[in-house]
Amino acid sequence: MKVLTLISGGDTGGAKTHVHSLLKGLNEHIQADMICFTDGPFASEARELGIRVDVIPGDPLSALKALKERIRAEGYDLIHCHGARGNLMGALLKRSTGLPVVTTVHSDPKLDYMGRPLAAATFGVLNNWALRVIRYHIGVSRPMADLLIDRGFDPQQVFTIPNGLPFDCPAPALDRSAYLSSLGLDWPEDAVIVGIAARLNPVKDIPTLLQGLAKALKEQPKLRLIVAGDGEEGPALKQLTEELGIEHQVCFAGWVTDTNSFYNAVDINALSSLSEGFPYALVEGARFSLPTVATRVGGVPDLVENGSTGLLFEPKDVTALAQHLAVLAADPALRRRLGHSLWTRAREEYSLDSTVRHQLEIYEAVLRRHMRPRKVRDGAVICGAYGQDNAGDEAVLRAIIGELRTIDPDLPLWVMTRKPKEVKKQYRAGAVYTFNVPGFCRRMAKSRLYVNGGGSLVQDVSSRRSLLFYLFTLSAAKRLGCRVMMYGCGIGPVNSSSGQKQTAKVINHSVDAITLRDRGSLDTLKKLGVSRPEIVLAADPALTLPAAPPETADALLAAAGLDPEHQRYLGITVRPWQGLEDKAPAFAAAADFAWEELGLTTVFVPIVGDMDTAAAKIVAAHIQKAPYAVLPPCPRTEDTIALFARMEVMLSMRLHALIFAAGHGVPLVGAVYDPKVSAFLDELEQDLHIPFDQVTAGKLIPLIRSAAQRSGDRAALEAKAVRLLQLEANNSIIARKLLER
């Protein structure tokens, strides 16, 4: 592969570090050359790194001619642009060369020329035009990629690449003592030193860091701070330290070139910014296993997970910052744990090796998509109960998207959802509002496959209108030329006779294949008279999803005031349902029993946001003896799964709470409000369940006791889940067959 990088040549800071380190790493695998449009330190430093660099000065038209000649002579496969000048030239070259063009967006294009109205009206306008012409875009952080999607760029052609650094960094030139001496500091040996490497300008909000330090010093007087950086706010910041009375505890080190010695000398890495893309300072600190305290902005939470790989606070929250600094100063073991966890994650995801690997994968994807035959029909439309804050349904969507992309990584995907904007950013897929009938029909008319599922969509218990809507989508997809698949579904109950007839008619006439998540659904289809589609027993797609690391679950539990190091847990998930108020004392009695007899602390884990939280509080109000916590909804499916994996016993009304726990061998107790719950437990050969309307304390407690007795043999329970997981593969096998027809 041969790639030509276009960049102005006047770049500094993070953009320069990113491009230089990336091209140096890429050239170990492919030929990655660079063209600059101005000569200077940027080009010179690139040459010193062994990067092939040429400078083409002059106006855009003359540079364009020289570039075309260079591309013809060298036979490049792809053009990669950085910055406004590079984007303009890439956009002009796109049609004349026929090569795919990709650009990396390092900052918000609308803010690049802030305070420079003439430049914004010329270079800014041209850059925005070029960005629209270029098809493929890379954000240097997840928020930057999300920003592009919010502005209408195709989410399926937007990629994210981390700002990586080499982790095999050289040893520091100075040890801690020598470095502090070089700064003229005579601080105590047991000082806990906080360090921040940042420009001294308003966006870095150093005043909040100084105020937080002053507050923390009252509790932990051994704290100290080194500020590495210069800028226009320097004099004002020094004056603020005097006003706060901390001038002897703070050192302004100026611009630091020996960053290895700086990070080696500090105990805590800090970042107090009001806004960030993804700062290199986080990864630089991670290389030295430094615990990190940072604001929850930009791409920071992608690396720094509160309580797991660092501590986060909201911008300008002096009190929270002071608390974090004091806690870390008092607890060396916590500093070591957070620092090691951060090093582990950063090495895996933010090392230069990782960045180069991601960039190569992006190049390969761009080249595949550029060569993909332009067909009248391509892609798949996925329809389900999505965008309703149900962690179970969203897990199913994530699993289906993952399996379809395993079949064809470049398959265009569109999701029918109540929240199109969120789907575009979270899944990098196209999206259309669920009830935008013209919109989803237009997509069906251009797609090869329509996927209905998973979940229990074909049922009339929740709503007859819901049943009619999903039957309509099946019929419309077939009429518009799609292959139609019902994916990992549960079927029924369909109670009305008219609904049964309509269901059988539509499925028989419109569906090509059905994969089912349980045998009960197979029986239901037979009773309905469905015979024409290919019907295959599979399992719920959500079984395929991985859990976040255990330390993530521990951090979430600790944030709720629990002690994951010493506690064991009974998980409870309840949902709003008729009669819950009457059954709440029975669930509470089970929690009290689990505490008194088994030593289990109760944790309520929601699947459907505020609904399950409200239901949990109804039950919790009746708990008399057991300690408990009602957890907030998790924003990420993998975090939710990690919490369920942490339970000793799981008592649930919700199906997907049982599915998530089952995958990790957790003994299950079901309170069955819907046949789908008992169908799953029977499929898993877990017999500890009871109809919801029969729930009493006297019946629940023996089930909890029996489940706890099984907790010592989680391997056997996991083996049963593995058997279901093997069945689940039938979902993607059938999808592949339909896509390849």
Image (cartoon, rainbow, N blue to C red):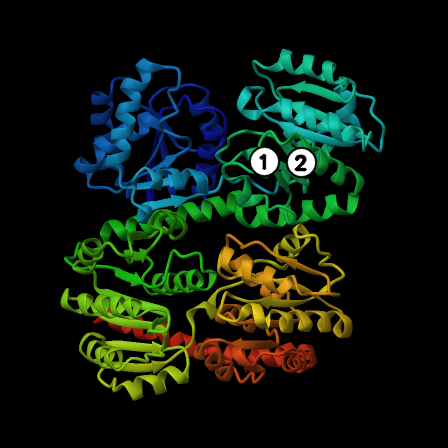
Residue 221 x, y percent position in the rendering: 82, 29
Residue 695 x, y percent position in the rendering: 58, 78
* 675 lies left or right of 376: right
- Residue at 39% across, 15% down: 115
* 287 lies left or right of 15: right
Q: Residues within 10 Å of mark 2 (few under 14, many from 20)?
A: some
Q: Which of 721 and 166 is in front in this view?
A: 721
Q: How crowded is mark 1: few (under 14 residues within 10 Å), some or many (20 or more)?
A: some
- Name the residue carrying label 1: 314
- Callout 1–callout 2 Cβ contact below 8 Å: yes
- Residue at 56% across, 83% down: 686
Instruction: Indicate the amino acid at tag 2.
Output: Ala
- Name the residue carrying label 2: 320
* Quarter location, residue 103: top left
* Quarter location, residue 310: top right
Residue 225 x, y percent position in the rendering: 72, 26
